[in-house]
Amino acid sequence: MKFFLLSVIVAVSVIVPVSTHAQRYQQLVKQGLEQLQGDSLLQAEATFREALNVDPLLKSNALLYQYIGNIQERRGEFQKALDSYRMGLNISSTTTSLLLCRAALYMRLDNQEHAMADYSEVLNLEPNQTEALFYRAFLYSQRRDYKRARADYDRLIKLEPMNENARLGLAVLNEKDRRPREAMEQLDALVQLFPSHASIYLVRGGMYLKRKQYELAQTDIERAIELEPENPDCYVSRSQLYKAMKKKKLAQADAKKAISLGADPSFLN
């Protein structure tokens, strides 16, 4: 983060000619970034806006709108953040960091269509951008466009062979795409690669549950609980397992535990 903030200051210094006017702009940007690093969000936003007023036409202002949008997101002002990202992209439509910020917010708001458009635009600009590849693969999978999802996951895994999330995503995709044997083989490999990661055991346990292999499912889910005893997803999974096994009291106990740890009660429906 510090390196990126420094790069912004350097970029601004290159773009703006050396003058009293330019020096004021650079000082404000530097001050705003320091405030942002110190979590002084209101002051940082005010400082960035003051810099924008000094010279509204600079291309580097696109990054200032990105930071303002980030601040607004943190305050829960999602529509204002989207407006800020849009204003930044109006200045520089090829700034991938802005596109990624907006795409992530669209994902947060469950606006998959707009998120897909932004991730695709990022990949048009940078074909090997790993964040965009991962989330576009996920979105394709949600649309049941398994061919395109597989292509993105495969590309990402070639770029980053040890990317756990990409490998896990591909295994889940294979399960959806009626390749259960391939999915299970990939999960077995992931357990070998990352034996202390609870999420993998939960996914594999869920697949065993789907196959009604209850003992294997229970072994995996309980291993996940050992690894992350405060993870509500573990108890959601075991509650679902107990429900399938007709162990009503145990299922209810785990459901209560999951909710006490922050799980959404809607999973009971």
Image (spheres, rainbow, N blue to C red):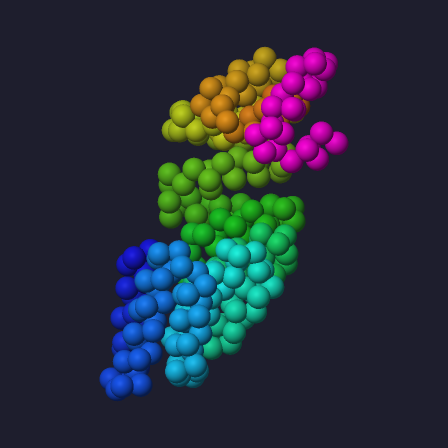
Q: Quadrant of residue 238?
A: top right
Q: Going 36% across and 62% down the picture, which residue do you hit?
A: 35
Quarter the N terminus occupies: bottom left
Q: Quadrant of the C terminus?
A: top right
What segment carries the magenta color? Answer: 242-269
- Residue 111: quadrant of the picture: bottom right
Placement of 36 over or under 142, stated as above or below: below
Note whether residue 167 is visible. Answer: yes
**In the rendered picture of this protein, how many numbered marks are placed on residues?**
0
Q: Residue furthest left?
A: 18
Q: Is residue 97 magenta?
A: no
| Front residue of 47 and 186 | 47
- Residue 58's x, y, as percent? 39, 81
Q: Position of residue 23 (x, y in %)?
A: 27, 80
x 57%, y 39%: residue: 173
Describe residue 261's horizontal placement relative to residue 64 as left or right: right
Towards the viewer: 174 or 214: 214
Residue displayed at 40% across by 83% down: 55
Q: Is residue 246 magenta?
A: yes
Which of 167 and 16 lies nearest the eye of the viewer? 16
Depth check, front residue: 217 or 232:
232
Q: Tell me if residue 77 comes above or below residue 50 in the rendering.
A: above
Q: Position of residue 9 (x, y in %)?
A: 29, 69
Q: Is residue 97 above or below residue 251?
A: below
